[in-house]
Amino acid sequence: MVKIGIICEGLTEFILMQSETFRAFLINHNIELVNTINAGGAGNLLPHNITGYIDILEKAGAQKIIILTDLDQDVCITKTKERISARTQDIVIIAVKQIEAWFLACTPAMQTLLKDPTFTFSLPEDENTPFQTINNLLTAQTGRGIGRGAGGKIKLVTRMLACGMDISKAATHPACPSARYFIEKIKGLTSL
């Protein structure tokens, strides 16, 4: 069994990585998650911080380190990876443009959330602020949004998980390559 540690940008990613659905996915692929660290913002994913996080994860038994962050307003994935300056043996995953785009790509969970079995979203990674897009869809469909700021994001990820949010389902969306890349990299760990 491959043991991994994850360093993620924020609380939304942290909750998603700690979810039963994601842990079951890992177990099904012979992977054990030893620990997840919430860096508390993309600005904290810098070399001088990451070194300490990696030490913690490796002391916990992690054989591979995954770093998960958002592209946000960065020009490209390469620039974001350069900013992080991870070690070559670590895997850096960039959610385009934000992790909530993966929510938009998980069609079954979005259909349940919006109570609309016909819902689809054609280009989730083209949304600059997918959290706000989902909030607007909820308001239009149900008359109530999810809230704002960090509290709203925590409510959203919790509700999405309750609705069946599954990164492996988001990865099947034809216009969500960053989720697909994440899943492929995780699956590839067992062939190392």
Image (cartoon, rainbow, N blue to C red):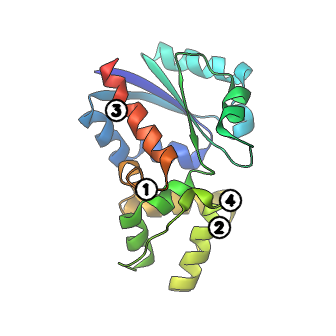
Residue 16 to residue 192: above or below: below
- Is label 4 or label 2 in front? 4
Disc 4 element: loop
Residue at 49%, 15% (x, y): give it: 58
Front: mark 1 or 2: 1
Q: Which mark is residue 128?
A: 4
* Horizontal relation, residue 180 to residue 128: left or right: left
Q: Are discs 1 and 4 less than 8 Å apart at CB?
A: no
Left-right relation of 67 to 76? left
Label 3 close to label 4 by CB (< 8 Å): no
Q: Quadrant of the N terminus?
A: top left
Q: Which residue is mark 3?
A: 187
Residue 145 image position (x, y, % from top left): 59, 76
The residue located at (45%, 20%) in the rendering is: 64
Percent from the top left, x then y, of residue 188? 36, 28
The disc placed on residue 174 is: 1
Residue drawn at 33 percent across, 21 percent down: 2
Mark 1 or 2, nearer chain start:
2
**Helix, strand or loop status at disc 1:** loop
1 or 3: tag closer to the N-terminus: 1
Residue receiving disc 2: 132
Whether pointer 1 and pointer 3 mark residues with C-beta atoms closer than 8 Å, the reply is no
- Residue at mark 1 to residue at mark 2: CA–CA distance: 22 Å
Q: Is residue 3 above or below residue 9?
A: above
Mark 1–mark 3 distance (CA, rounded to whole Å): 19 Å
**Kind of element beneath mark 2:** helix
Q: Nearer the N terminus, badge 1 or badge 4?
A: 4
